[in-house]
Amino acid sequence: MRWQGGRKGGNIEDRRGMGAGTMAGGGIGVIIIALIGYFVLGMEPDEIAQIVSEQPAGTSTTQEGIHGTPADEAGQFVDVIGTNINDVWSQTLRGYTPPNVVLYEQGTGTGCGYGQAAMGPFYCPADQTVYLDLGFWQDMQTQLGASGADFAKAYVIAHEFGHHVQKLTGTSDKVRQAQQAARSQEEANSWSIALELQADCYAGVWASHAAEVSGGAVALEAGDLEEGLKTANAIGDDMIQKRMTGKVSPEAFTHGTAEQRVKWLQRGFNTGDPKACDTFSQ
């Protein structure tokens, strides 16, 4: 993926190296617990944080990092990709405002509770912020079989920005209300699946317009889409359940199957139209 000549927005808060403390339990065991919680059981970031860190949900630690564009390549990648995603949505969605972006290591305070690296990348609607521990990309590759290609990483970022779009449009609030009124956990999960698949589709919409809004400075190259689809396949509920538990339980799906995630990322890319991302009626 071409990105190094892309525009930087400087809208990054870098909290890495701030010594947030050691993860309770430590190591890969904690990562697996959080992966099962987030991808398989559909738990919210604050709920997972409560289990992993044993801190009360809703607790937020005041923490200020360095604002601007990080000096390292990984940080610059996030800035360029995030800026490009914002440029696409600014042209696509009237009244769009960019989310905050926080880079951290191990753990950090958020508006949704105490966030930890084991939770993976996530969006907190309470403070409209995307939280990224960049080491999680490696965990996704080694533990889930996702691609390590740049576009695969960018897809993950664009998915979280997609949740921000859902917050701005009111979609995520409507889904939460529908889940609260659901008559069964399976019905509530169906709303979660539609929300996640729409975020995948929105990631595809971004990728479709990335080169257009950047004058080609940010653009997919040969094979990039396939690497993104490989990652979408790897993080399907059925694939993760099979890896983590050895069996597939459709009633516990919350993010969509591998086939569904691939389908909606592809649809967003092929159409480039957010209106084609109506996962709630299909």
Image (cartoon, rainbow, N blue to C red):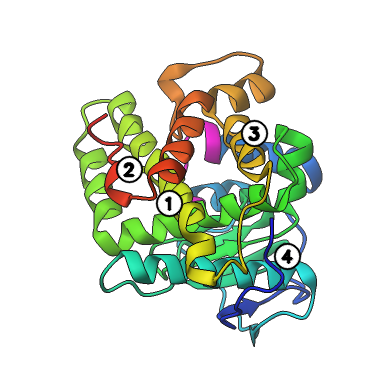
Amino acid type assigned to the residue bearing label 4 in the image = Glu
| Residue 1 at least partly seen | yes
Q: Between label 4 and label 2, give the one nearer the viewer.
A: 2
194 part of magenta stretch: no
Write down the residue under mark 4: 105
The CA span between labels 3 and 1 is 17 Å
Q: Please state if 101 lies on the left or on the right of 143 as rendered.
A: left
CB-based contact (under 8 Å), mark 1 and mark 4? no
- Nearer-the-camera pick, 188 or 255: 255
Say whether disc 3 or disc 4 marks the residue closer to the N-terminus: 4
Say whether disc 3 or disc 2 marks the residue closer to the N-terminus: 3
Amino acid type assigned to the residue bearing label 2 in the image = Cys
Q: Which mark is residue 190?
A: none
Range covered by the magenta-colored residues: 38-45
Q: Which mark is residue 230?
A: 3
x and y percentages locating residue 79 in the rendered image: 62, 73
Amino acid type assigned to the residue bearing label 3 in the image = Lys
The CA span between labels 1 and 4 is 30 Å
Amino acid type assigned to the residue bearing label 1 in the image = Val
Write down the residue under mark 2: 277
Where the C terminus falls, by quadrant? top left
x and y percentages locating residue 89 in the rendered image: 39, 65
The CA span between labels 1 and 2 is 9 Å
CB-based contact (under 8 Å), mark 1 and mark 2? yes
Q: Between label 1 and label 4, give the one nearer the viewer.
A: 1
CB-based contact (under 8 Å), mark 3 and mark 2? no
For label 3, count other residues whose C-alpha is less than 10 Å away and answer few (under 14), some (14-19) or many (20+): some
Q: Between label 3 and label 1, give the one nearer the viewer.
A: 1
Q: Kindly identify the residue that appears in the image at 75 percent across and 35 percent down.
A: 143
| Residue 25 at least partly seen | no
Q: Kindly identify the residue that appears in the image at 65 percent across and 51 percent down.
A: 151
